[in-house]
Amino acid sequence: MTDTLRRACVMGHPVAHSRSPLIHGYWLEQLGIAGAYDRMDLTPEAFPAFIAGFGRNGYVGGNVTVPHKEAAFRGVARRDAAAEAVGAVNTIWLEDGVLVGGNSDVHGFLANLDEAAPGWDVPGARVVVLGAGGSARAITYAFRTRGVDVALVNRTAARAQELAARFAPGVRAHAWAELPALLGAADVLVNCTSCGMTGKPPLEVDLAPLKGSAVVYDIVYVPLETPLLAQARRRGHRTVDGLGMLLHQAGYGFEKWFGARTRVTPELRALIEADLRAAAART
């Protein structure tokens, strides 16, 4: 370690599964930057003190994952517009000695959608978002920054209504029973639930009402092709997986910490896909 080595980290509990060190390590090597990216497994009790002394701990920034995103929101001195709107911080960095928090999910979600499904934002585009948790908050806000109206569908109606009120007007809550009718008019369908993820219950959605031009986006990336995406692909829809979102959101923080722009290359995607396959084979 030298005085010029810039260090960042991912903070969570647990954090051993995080692909962030692999992603940022790839960019550091490709760009020839003297830097390091660590894993920090911090309990909820230890996290507030760690970020309170963040600079003294030797870090210039980092990613925040479960279960610390709301604690990070409270612990930073300043927040970007996305973090303020969503109510959660997943990226932090030091700016003139001040700890700043942002939410890179908004950037990562849109960058991935724009790249994988260009032209999705047709005039008057209609979007259906499944779920009402933290990811749905970030993604609903992302669509609203583009002026796109959102129909929120969640099995617990009260949570969807709360989220819709947060971003009203332009966002409406709907019962799960209304989904078939909503799909008939949708240009983009996004799954923001954990259903369909490895080890979780399946997402039971019949895509038959969905028009052929609609894009289907699943933010889950384990497995890479969820049952929802497989059904959509068989029906001829354009599909967008969650791995691209993970890679694009990572670049937001990298530029803050290491001062360089990144590219999501086929080589990087292949590297992470191989790691995901190896992890699946071990389980």
Image (tube, rainbow, N blue to C red):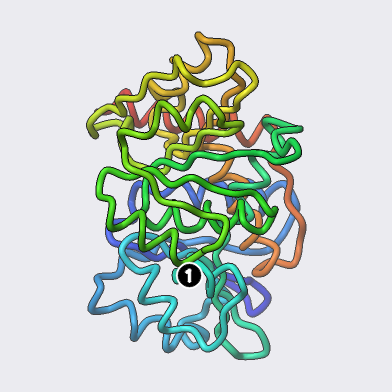
Residue at the spot of label 1: 89
> Quick check: 247 left or right of 121?
left
Helix, strand, or loop for circle 1?
Answer: loop
Q: Is residue 62 visible?
A: no
Task: Return the residue nearer the eye: 26 or 106.
Answer: 106
* In this view, 96 is above or below 231: below
Residue 67, percent across and down? 31, 64
Task: Return the residue nearer the eye: 113 or 263.
Answer: 113
Task: Return the residue nearer the eye: 36 or 190.
Answer: 190
* In this view, 279 is above or below 213: below
Say which quadrant the C terminus sits in. Answer: top left
Residue 58, percent across and down? 51, 80
Q: Is residue 5 visible?
A: yes
Residue 81, percent across and down? 62, 73
- Give the residue drawn at x 57%, y 79%: 79
- Give the residue drawn at x 30%, y 25%: 204
Say which quadrant the N terminus sits in. Answer: bottom right
Residue 138, percent across and down? 50, 57
* In this view, 31 is above or below 5: above
Q: Amino acid at mark 1?
A: Val
Please give the count of numbered marks on the rendered protein. 1
